[in-house]
Image: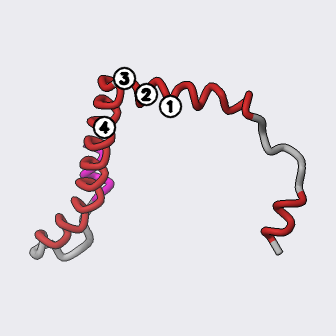
Amino acid sequence: MDGKLWFKVNGNIGSDEENAPVHMAMRLVLSNSKITAVGAIQTLFEASMYTFVFFWGPLLEERSINIEHEMPFGVIFSR
């Protein structure tokens, strides 16, 4: 039913003129190897940072066997 309704709606779809700046920007980024390289490096750096932060907390908890209570992440991240 959703597909049928989607095909019947004629309003607020957007036009090619509205999407032109996006297409021009993508063409510029993909045509210039320096911009593409900076984007790839930034993406890989951010991915590694998110992976580190995601696994860092559980790793600290796993390694802290002698602590009787939960890790004080509020104190750790506030310093």
Amino acid type indicated by mark 4: Ala
What residue is drawn where x is 11% and y is 75%?
65
* Camera-side mark, 3 or 4: 3
**Residue 67 x %, y %:** 15, 72
Q: Which residue is mark 4?
A: 40
Apparent side of residue 66 relative to residue 35 in the rendered image (left or right): left
Amino acid type indicated by mark 1: Met
Read off the magenta span: 73-79
Residue neighbourhood size for the residue with mark 4, other residues' Cα within 10 Å, grouped as few (<14), some (14–19), many (≥20): few
Amino acid type indicated by mark 3: Asn
Apparent side of residue 76 relative to residue 25 in the rendered image (left or right): left
Asked if labels 2 and 3 touch by Cβ distance under 8 angstroms, the answer is yes
**Residue 33 x %, y %:** 31, 26
**Residue 29 tag number:** 2
Relative to 41, residue 34 above or below: above
Q: Which residue is mark 3?
A: 32
